[in-house]
Image (cartoon, grey):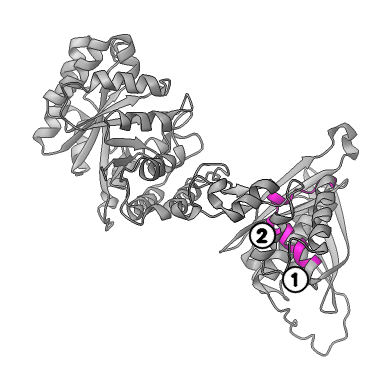
């Protein structure tokens, strides 16, 4: 297979994403993950930046197996390369490979740098030559090349030739503004690569929503070096998404990007980087998203269970993902049977039980429940209907009080419940009524089920189902919960937002306990005591 050099710039271009701020430790952790995935080139950032300089010092301590860390900077701004602080910082980073960018577009030369076109050519040549004399492998990013080519073809090509004549080892053509289309990439590269023996690369941005397509088109046009970021992070609309580019190149175009067997780790690494970046993983992201291989329509589910290729372009396991069968009012009995099988429940498509469950599901979704986003509630619903599960606790009642104390709004909840016949009455305060309820029920249950301490709520969403009803409208509450191993969603629906929240909250706790199959402990000092409620605050 022809090899494509994947160049990851998550730590530099990706760090320019709105909402992302990497610490040095974050960057080191991501570096280790990219190396484990088999990415050959990792751009670490600007060593002229204080934080990135610290990264380059510390990254030397990592025992990387495949990756080469690359330092990034610009062409000189000082009168000479030897006196330029950015170039000197690149050398201090002590990386074998350095990447510098220079201007290809006359607009940037005259209006941004405000130097002559000839001076810009000298700046490029001086910078590359200086780094080459210091023994570095130099990648040259021809910034705004495609816009520059469209404006002044001859000059754009001169800037690339200046870098190559000075010794640049690889030239990367950049669609910096992300406005070019695939056919333009192909046509321009066809002209730009003539007479060039050095390896060529592509660096695409996603402002036109075609960065992945542009990168693939560039490879077809002869580029063997592809730059991008994990999950498509980057300034404005992001960079070319390596999470899509890598499997497209390797599985669809027969080009080697990662070492053998590493592609199946793609989903795990993409999700890890999203977590470290403090960004929600896009549910519908191709290849690695939770919905990338999710099937909802009954016809689709029936076909997929017979022949997965009927509605899947690749096997999910190839990229480390998994098939997901969604159950909703659009589902047929096939979806229910598949879901039940995954829960080790005995259910056949032709039985009256399957029809009854489907009718129940459709009725509940008509009332406002949304089970495809609440896997925990769906699991409990099926188990309750097919196994008649005994609950871990039963609610006698709850009360929520909201009080204005000066400038502070205080919420207090009291719950009364039973665990194995033992009554428990507990009160707790919280930042709001739902948080107060959560705190109160946890306080009541923690002595019986200590594993609840491992669980926490990660998301809370409220949706008004009929806005025309105003404040009397029915609402749907979706809660996402998580422990050290899993994440699950639960749902509640009611005209009262507190009641809907309680439904989702109780399901989240019940799901955790059923998942752990936690036996109820007997609180110390109660073995011989008569059951009676005790209020704890």
Q: CA distance from mark 2 to mark 1?
A: 33 Å
Residue 461 marker: none
Magenta segment boundaries in residue numbering: 367-385
Does residue 368 show up magenta in the picture?
yes
User: In the rendered view, would you say 394 is above or below 325?
Assistant: below
Quadrant holding the C terminus: bottom right
Circles 2 and 1, Cβ within 8 Å, touching? The answer is no
| Residue tagged 2 | 338
Question: Is 241 placed above or below 447 here?
Answer: above
In what element is the residue under mark 1?
helix
Circle 2 packing at 10 Å, graded few (<14), some (14-19), many (20+), is: many
In this rendering, would 59 be left or right of 302?
left
- Residue at 83% in and 62% down: 352
Residue drawn at the location 35% of the way across and 16% of the way down: 147
Quarter occupied by residue 185? top left
Q: Position of residue 138 (x, y in %)?
A: 18, 34
Instruction: Determine if residue 112 is in view.
Output: no
Tell me which secondary structure the magenta stretch mostly adopts: helix
Judged from this view, the residue extending furthest toward the bottom is: 528
Mark found first going from the N terminus, 2 or 1? 2
In the rendered image of this protein, does residue 266 appear above or below residue 390?
above
Let me know if residue 533 appears in the view.
yes
Q: Is residue 519 left or right of residue 182?
A: right
The residue positioned 42% from the left and 24% from the top of the image is 178
């Amino acid at each position: 297979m022809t090899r494509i050099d994947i160049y990851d710039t998550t730590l530099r271009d990706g760090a320019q994403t709105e909402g992302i701020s990497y610490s040095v430790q974050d960057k080191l952790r991501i570096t280790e993950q990219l190396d484990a995935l088999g990415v050959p080139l990792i751009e670490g950032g600007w060593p002229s930046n204080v934080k990135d300089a610290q990264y380059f010092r510390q990254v030397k301590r990592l025992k990387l197996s495949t990756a080469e860390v690359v330092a990034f900077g610009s062409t000189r701004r000082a009168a000479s390369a030897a006196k330029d602080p950015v170039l000197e910082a690149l050398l201090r980073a002590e990386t074998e490979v350095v990447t510098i960018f220079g201007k290809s577009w006359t607009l940037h030369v005259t209006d941004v740098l405000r130097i002559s076109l000839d001076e810009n050519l000298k700046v490029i040549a001086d910078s590359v030559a200086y780094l080459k004399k210091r023994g570095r492998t130099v990648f040259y990013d021809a910034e705004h090349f495609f816009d520059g080519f469209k404006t002044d073809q001859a000059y754009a090509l001169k800037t690339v030739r200046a870098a190559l004549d000075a010794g640049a080892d690889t030239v990367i053509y950049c669609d910096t503004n992300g406005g070019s289309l695939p056919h333009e990439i192909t046509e321009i590269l066809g002209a730009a690569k003539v007479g060039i023996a050095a390896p060529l690369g592509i660096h695409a941005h996603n402002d036109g929503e075609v960065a992945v397509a542009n990168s693939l088109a560039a490879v077809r046009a002869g580029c063997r070096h592809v730059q991008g970021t994990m999950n498509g992070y980057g300034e404005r609309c992001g960079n070319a998404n390596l999470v899509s580019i890598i499997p497209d190149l390797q599985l669809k175009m027969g080009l080697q990007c990662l070492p053998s067997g590493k592609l199946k780790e793609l989903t795990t690494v993409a999700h890890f980087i999203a977590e470290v970046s403090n960004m929600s993983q896009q549910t519908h992201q191709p290849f690695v998203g939770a919905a990338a291989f999710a099937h909802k329509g009954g016809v689709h589910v029936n076909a997929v269970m017979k022949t997965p290729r009927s509605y899947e372009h690749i096997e999910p396991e190839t990229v480390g993902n998994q098939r997901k069968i969604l159950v909703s009012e659009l589902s047929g009995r096939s979806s229910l049977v598949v879901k039940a099988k995954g829960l080790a429940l005995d259910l056949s498509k032709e039985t009256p039980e399957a029809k009854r469950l489907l009718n129940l599901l459709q009725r509940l979704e008509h009332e406002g429940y949304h089970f495809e986003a609440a896997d925990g509630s769906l699991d409990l619903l099926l188990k309750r209907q097919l196994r008649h599960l005994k609950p871990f606790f039963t609610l006698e009642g709850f009360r929520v009080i909201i009080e204005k104390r000066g400038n502070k709004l205080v919420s207090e909840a009291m719950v009364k419940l039973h665990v194995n016949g033992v009554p428990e009455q507990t009160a707790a305060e919280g930042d709001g009524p739902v948080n107060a309820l959560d705190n109160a029920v946890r306080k009541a249950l923690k002595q019986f089920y200590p594993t609840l301490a491992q669980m926490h709520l990660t998301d809370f969403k409220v949706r008004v189902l009929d806005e025309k009803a105003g404040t009397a409208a029915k609402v749907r509450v979706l809660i996402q919960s998580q422990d050290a191993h899993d994440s699950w969603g639960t749902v509640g629906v009611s005209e009262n937002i507190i009641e809907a929240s309680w439904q989702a909250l109780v399901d989240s706790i019940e799901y955790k306990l059923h998942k752990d199959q936690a036996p109820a402990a007997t609180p110390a000092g109660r073995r011989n005591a008569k059951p009676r409620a005790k209020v704890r605050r």
